[in-house]
Image (tube, grey):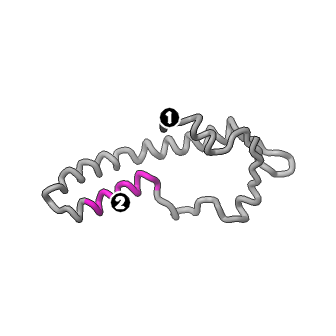
């Protein structure tokens, strides 16, 4: 069992800062737009199609990320009286258990 120390985690500044990060889908959209702009009209239409599809997936990505976080906290972690958060699995182990990425 992993012993997750929330106080240490906060002290190290590891929590995501509000408005400071992009999701993988947002990064993909940004990269596709850069590639589209480099290749001009000839291949640009194909990039536009990919960008539209990726943009349509942003809400689903949000639902999946929020669901993962809520399930991890609800089913894998518990707080002790001392303020430590203890988890049966690490977030990476829970991710691998939850998602079929291989």
Q: Position of residue 26 (x, y in %)?
A: 40, 55
- For the residue pair 100 and 27, the one nearer the viewer reads as 100
- For the residue pair 47 and 60, the one nearer the viewer reads as 47
In the rendered image, the residue lying farthest to the right is: 82
Magenta highlight: main SS:
helix
Residue at (34% x, 59% y) in the render: 31
Residue 74 to residue 41: above or below = above
Q: Position of residue 94 (x, y in %)?
A: 62, 39
Q: Position of residue 14 (x, y in %)?
A: 64, 61
Q: Secondary structure at mark 1?
A: loop
Residue at (40% x, 57% y) in the render: 27
In the picture, the disc for residue 83 is: none
Q: Which residue carries the number 2 mark? A: 30
Q: From the viewer's perspective, is 48 left or right of 61?
A: left
Q: Residues within 10 Å of mark 2 (few under 14, many from 20)?
A: some
Q: From the viewer's perspective, is 35 left or right of 19?
A: left
Q: Secondary structure at mark 2?
A: helix
Magenta-span inclusion, residue 10 = no
Q: Which residue carries the number 1 mark? A: 100
Q: From the viewer's perspective, is 44 left or right of 50?
A: left
Q: Residues within 10 Å of mark 1 (few under 14, many from 20)?
A: few
In the rendered view of the protein, which quadrant contains the N terminus?
A: top right
Residue at (76% x, 53% y) in the render: 5
Q: CA distance from mark 1 to mark 2?
A: 26 Å
Q: From the viewer's perspective, is 56 left or right of 91?
A: left
- For the residue pair 27 and 2, the one nearer the viewer reads as 2
Residue 70 to residue 51: above or below = above
């Amino acid at each position: 069992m992993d012993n997750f120390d929330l106080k240490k985690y906060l002290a190290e500044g590891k929590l995501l800062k509000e408005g400071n990060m992009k999701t993988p889908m947002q990064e993909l959209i940004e990269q596709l737009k850069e590639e589209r702009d480099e290749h001009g009209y000839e291949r640009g239409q194909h990039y536009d199609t990919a960008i539209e599809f990726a943009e349509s997936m942003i809400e689903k990505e949000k639902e999946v990320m929020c669901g993962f976080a809520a399930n991890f906290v609800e089913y894998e972690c518990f707080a002790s009286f001392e303020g430590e958060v203890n988890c049966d699995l690490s977030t990476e182990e829970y991710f691998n258990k939850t998602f079929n990425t291989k």
